[in-house]
Image (cartoon, coloured by chain):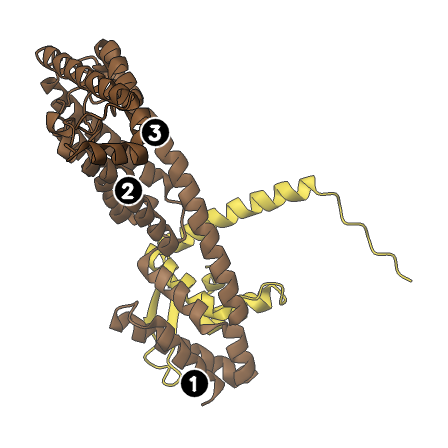
Chain colours: A yellow, B brown
């Protein structure tokens, strides 16, 4: 959903955006992305429609709905709170010594 | 066939008829668009590799379409839960209603022992389909079945009232008398007198068994079978004597114990609601235990199966 926050995208672009934003750390099984997108669409958090101008190959473009935007904000807040709590517990990373 | 075409063919085959035709074609069209875009950028081999095994993608598409990830556990467990309800309610109710008909007893016991297992299998099947924890809705259906069975019990039990007790007592006395007679026969056979009657024939459904105090004793099951001659009697005794002696002794002891225990075999009538509630809660608790084990085993089997499929893919 966060990948759609800056505008509608088709599935391949979502996968690419996630990979690039995470500098390759998050590699979605790209085929598994579509069931996830369809599940989000069922929930009403994203809306998909076929792009009539896409031609070949066919593309279905997804965009966040209002409910999706609110849900994304809610989940992001929860995640950041969780990550912050874990970061407080973990010891700080030791700096690497050169040479 | 190119890698992309092969993957799409595998995806079509894996989807099969698990999705409605429109949904299936839409998924395939979308997958084709994705693969072609990826292939243009990365090459077909890498595009297909990143896409993942077609079978796993198809399974995930089917799960998403059926709402297995997003639907509530209650809705997912509805079909299996209703089957479980019937599987528990029907045989136990049949058993209650068949009180007083000894010929139905074995049938009732088989139903009570085996039919709920099919309900549990239906539950496990649903867990395998959805890969979800469905214990809570399953337990709620089981609780409903417990309450329904107990409600029927309350409805049936009024027929076992104080008017029936003398009849049951009389039947049990008859049973004691008949087995005492059989014991006398056994003693005669042990002395070598070989009366022309086998000391044991058939089975009894009298009050000695299964705790159903309302069963009338069926005399026809207790009558001795005639043997044709003393020689035949002697031969029969040599073959079966030890077993007959044991059986008659045990049946006589059972009948005497039942006669002594008669007053305590009748449940209070009507069953007080607090006791009904405890009985329903106990039944539900046991169902939670069984359902949890069944759910866990089903999910473990799914995990093993999925892992093997991924290795093969």
Task: Give residue B114's quadrant in the image.
Answer: top left
Mark 2 in CB contact with mark 3 (< 8 angstroms): no
Relative to the observer, which residue lies in front, A88 or A38? A38
Vertical side of B125 occupied by B310: above or below: below
Disc assigned to residue B242: 3
Q: Secondary structure at mark 3?
A: helix
How far apart marks 2 and 3 lie (CA) works out to 33 Å
Q: Position of residue B206 (x, y in %)?
A: 18, 23
- Same subunit: marks 2 and 3: yes
Residue at 42% in and 50% down:
B298
The first of marks 2 and 1 along the sequence is 1
Q: Crowdedness of circle 2 by 10 Å Cα count: few (<14), some, many (20+)? A: few
**Which image quarter holds the N terminus of chain B?**
bottom left
Distance from the alpha carbon under mark 2 to that under mark 1: 50 Å
- Label 2 belongs to which residue? B114
Q: Which residue is mark 1?
A: B5
Q: Which of the chains bears the disc numbered 3?
A: B
Q: Is residue A71 left or right of residue B186?
A: right
Vertical relation: B53 (above or below) B240: below
**Between B157 and B245, which is closer to the camera in this rendering?**
B245
Q: Is residue B313 above or below residue A66?
A: below
Q: Which mark is residue B86?
A: none
In the current view of this chain or complex, which residue is farthest to the bottom?
A: B1
- Quadrant in which residue B16 is drawn: bottom left
Residue B131: % across, % down: 41, 53
Which residue shows up at 22% across the image and 34% down it? B231
């Amino acid at each position: 959903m966060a990948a759609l926050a800056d505008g509608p995208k088709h599935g391949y672009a979502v996968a690419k955006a996630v990979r690039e934003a995470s500098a390759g750390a998050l590699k979605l099984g790209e085929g598994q992305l579509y069931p996830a997108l369809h599940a989000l669409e069922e929930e009403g958090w994203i809306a998909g429609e076929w792009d009539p101008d896409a031609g070949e190959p066919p593309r279905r473009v997804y965009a966040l709905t209002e409910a999706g935007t609110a849900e994304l904000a809610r989940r992001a807040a929860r995640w950041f709170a969780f990550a912050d709590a874990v970061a407080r517990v973990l010891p700080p990373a030791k700096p690497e010594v050169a040479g | 066939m190119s890698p992309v075409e092969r993957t799409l063919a595998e995806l079509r085959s894996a989807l099969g008829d698990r999705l409605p035709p429109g949904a299936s074609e839409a998924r395939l069209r979308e997958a084709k668009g994705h693969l072609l875009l990826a292939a243009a950028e990365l090459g077909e081999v890498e595009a297909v590799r990143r896409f993942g095994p077609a079978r796993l993608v198809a399974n995930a598409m089917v799960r998403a379409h059926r709402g297995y990830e997003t639907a509530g556990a209650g809705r997912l467990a509805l079909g299996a839960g209703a089957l479980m309800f019937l599987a528990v309610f029907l045989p136990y109710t049949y058993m209650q209603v068949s009180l007083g008909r000894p010929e139905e007893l074995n049938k009732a016991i088989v139903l009570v022992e085996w039919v709920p297992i099919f309900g549990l299998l239906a539950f496990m099947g649903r867990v395998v389909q959805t890969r979800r924890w469905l214990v809570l809705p399953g337990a709620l259906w089981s609780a409903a079945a417990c309450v329904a069975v107990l409600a029927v019990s309350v409805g049936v039990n009024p027929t076992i009232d104080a008017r029936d007790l003398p009849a049951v007592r009389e039947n049990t006395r008859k049973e004691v008398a008949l087995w005492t007679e059989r014991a006398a026969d056994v003693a005669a056979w042990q002395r070598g007198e070989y009366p022309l009657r086998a000391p044991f024939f058939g089975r009894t459904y009298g009050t000695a068994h299964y705790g159903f105090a309302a069963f009338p004793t069926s005399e026809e099951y207790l009558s001795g079978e005639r043997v044709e001659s003393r020689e035949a009697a002697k031969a029969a005794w040599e073959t079966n004597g030890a077993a007959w002696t044991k059986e008659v002794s045990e049946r006589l002891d059972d009948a005497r114990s039942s006669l002594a225990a008669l007053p305590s075999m009748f449940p209070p009538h009507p069953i007080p609601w607090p006791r009904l509630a405890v009985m329903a809660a106990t039944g539900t608790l046991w169902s939670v235990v069984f359902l949890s084990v069944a759910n866990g085993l089903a999910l473990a089997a799914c995990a093993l199966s999925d892992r093997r499929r991924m290795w093969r893919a």
